[in-house]
Every structure is written in C-alpha cells, then in structure tokens.
Image: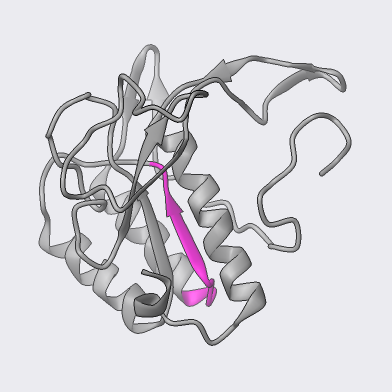
Amino acid sequence: DNGLGVAGVAPGAAILPLKCGYRVGQKDFLPLSAVVQAINEAISAKVDVINMSLGLPDDNAAMRVVIDRAVQNNILLIAAVGNDYSSIKNYPATYSNVVGVGAVDRSGRWAPYSNNNSSVWITAPGSAICGLGYKTDNEYIGTWDGTSLAAPAVAGLAAMARQADPGITVTEFF
C-alpha cells in the first residue's frame, strides 16, 4: 500500500521475511535445512502465519517435526502445492495441518500449471501476478505465474483472520 501499484491483502500485518532458497546461475537451490531453520526462526519470533511459497519432493522427518511444532504454537501454515500440472505432491503442502494452495487464472479457472491433488485445500489467483521488484517508482519488472504467488494471498487472508480474532485456532481456520 505504498501508492506504487501493489497492495497486500492484510495491510495491518507485519512481515518477517525469511528466505530459504538461492540461485546460482540459472539453477535454484532449496536446502531442506534452510527451510527447517526458517520455520524455527518464525516460531521463535512468535509469528501468527507462515507462508511457504516453496515445495520439496520428499517427506522428511525434520520437516514434519518443525511443521508439527509450528502448529503446536498455533501458527497457521500456508504452502504452495507446485507447478507441475500433475498429481505430484509437494511438501509441506501435503501435510494435513498445512493449507495447500493451488492457483486459478484471471477467469477463475484452474491454472494450466497448478498441481491438482488432495493437498489442495483452496485456490487463489496465481496468474499474471505483479511482483514486488521494480525498476522505478512507476515501472514494475513484470508479472509471474505460479502457486508460489497464490499462497501469499491465502496467507494474507489468514493474517486478516488473526487480526479479526487473535484466538482463532489452526483447526478453526481450516
């Protein structure tokens, strides 16, 4: 809500940015240890909502433990389901205590890249989403597609739910 063309869903929410992945050349890396560490940092910071615009292909004990710990701390967990346009399940969206987010296009139809499986709890706009990077005050870099862009909209709704009712539990949000 800075007057430059992009506003968040929950304008009263504070954001604690914790980046887990990195890029070398054209290759992206997402170490499991970095994801677990970031979730632990969010728990320690006593956040209300964690958005995970990421996905890992395999279940992992460390991931499951930290996700369960976040839920025990009454944190609402939101995760992208993936962009393989398949029934492939990604973690942590596959966990039953995480809200898995698929994407729809501008017409409200299932986006052609969004995974579609039992990990999808809800869909949100994920096509042609304006990014936060910009060249000048009035010129944004561009738009992107993906469930990683849909998940923050749901995380914003979770933040609004917490603003309206700070006592809302993970189960009630589901």
Residue sitting nearer the eye, 63 or 145:
145
Task: Say whether residue 143 is left or right of residue 65.
Answer: right
Q: Is residue 92 above or below residue 27?
A: below
- In percent of width and height, residue 9 lies at 66, 50
Report the residue at 66% width, 74% height from top.
163
> Which quadrant would residue 64 be assigned to in this image?
bottom left
Q: In the image, is residue 21 part of the stretch drawn in magenta?
A: no
Task: Say whether residue 87 is left or right of residue 116.
Answer: left
- In percent of width and height, residue 99 lies at 33, 58
Kindly give the residue lying farthest to the bottom in the view shown.
167
Report the residue at 20% width, 71% height from top.
65
Q: Quadrant of the N terminus?
A: top right
Q: Is residue 18 above or below residue 161?
A: above
Q: Is residue 85 above or below residue 160?
A: above
> Which quadrant would residue 160 be assigned to in this image?
bottom right
Q: Is residue 173 above or below residue 169?
A: above
Residue sitting nearer the eye, 23 or 91:
91
- In percent of width and height, residue 101 lies at 36, 46
Q: Quadrant of the C terminus?
A: bottom left
- In percent of width and height, residue 88 lies at 12, 35
Report the residue at 19% width, 60% height from top.
95
Residue sitting nearer the eye, 14 or 8:
8
Task: Say whether residue 130 is left or right of residue 125.
Answer: right
Span colored in magenta = 44-53
Q: In the image, is residue 49 part of the stretch drawn in magenta?
A: yes
